Amino acid sequence: MSESVSGIVAYPVTPFSADSGKVDEPVLRALVDRLVEAGVDAVAPLGSTGESAYLDDQEWAAVASICVEQVDGRVPTVVGVSELTTAGTIARARLAERLGATALMMLPVAYWRLTDNELRRHFTAVADAVALPVMAYNNPGTSGIDMSPEFLVDLVAGVDNITMIKESSGDIARMRRIAELGGASVPFFNGSNRLALQAFGAGAAGWCTAAACLVPEQITEVWRLLRAGETDSAAKLFDRLEPLLTALTRDGLPRTVKAGLRSLGIDAGDPRPPLLPVDDDTRRTIAELIAAATR
């Protein structure tokens, strides 16, 4: 690929209008600008935080188009293309490619538990259908499918377009194992907020995070400090952010990030049912943690 992905990979939420319940395009564009202007290294719409699983095909296409257009090449755009069927995932991958995405993020989702052979065929079929690089995404907490480091590294080695791994199981030992097996030739990304510093220490190429929606300057500063070799300063800043990072993950990212945005005066609407907004106590806690993190 012509443009590599590394550093802070930020997930925007998908905002919904309170009046119509439809995707709120002006707010989505403003969220993308907020992330890019704060210095994130890539924007990754339509993952778990973006409520991709709760969008119909037209909405998914609209969000992908809006985000790629609004980023406008300022940073890479990594579009999540996950869908239940292989054919549906291929259709989304091809559309993201036509729209101008830099790379694709692919989480296997399934009703039936998939075998390693089924997973390999699924990933290979999608990767073969496009020319864009694919980030193989492991998140057993949301997908119900858990891919081992050995499987993931073998997938990268065996399929040309699968070039990156995103590990969101919350197990730092798995990231270290990916680094051990893949070496410098297999970039891996951390998707667990609380493990960010440990993951970078293990050799992670980047940190995929929704927290950048709420505290973008602080998240990007952690990465800047680490690159500058100022590890003590990075650790101190991360310690200040950690209570917020933990709270966001605990109550589910679409719910908590949207609550946090509302406390900042950015109305991204409520999560889509069956998801419900957080309760008032949680909303107040998140607002307090944002204030503490940005002091």
Image: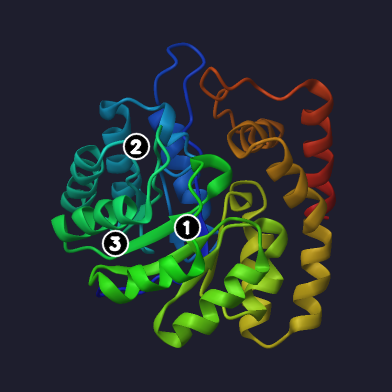
SS at circle 2: helix
Where does label 2 land, which residue?
63
Name the one closer to the observer, 195 or 34: 195
**Residue occupying the point 43% across, 40% down:** 113
In this view, the residue in front, 109 or 255, is 109
Is residue 208 shown left or right of residue 151? right
Q: Earlier in the sequence, mark 2 or mark 1?
A: 2
Real-space Cα separation, disc 2 to disc 3, in angstroms = 15 Å
The amino acid on which the numbered mark 3 sits, given as a three-letter code, is Thr
Q: Nearer the viewer, residue 171 or 232?
A: 171
Label 1: which secondary element: loop
Quarter of the image with the N terminus in it: bottom left
Q: Residues within 10 Å of mark 1 (few under 14, many from 20)?
A: some
> Does residue 205 sit above or below 270 in this rendering?
below
Q: Nearer the viewer, mark 1 or mark 3?
A: 1
Residue 292 falls left or right of residue 265: right
How many dots with numbers?
Answer: 3
Farthest residue, direction top: 19
What distance separates the C-alpha of mark 1 from that of mark 3?
24 Å
Q: Amino acid at mark 1?
A: Met
Instruction: Please state which amino acid type lies under the numbered disc 2.
Output: Val
Quadrant of the rendered structure where residue 227 is? Answer: bottom right
Q: Is residue 204 visible?
A: no
Is label 3 in a helix, a strand or a loop? loop
Residue receiving disc 1: 147
Residue name at image x 41 percent, y 35 percent: 52
Residue 102, labelled with which disc? 3
Q: How far from the left and from the top, in percent, is residue 120?
A: 30, 58
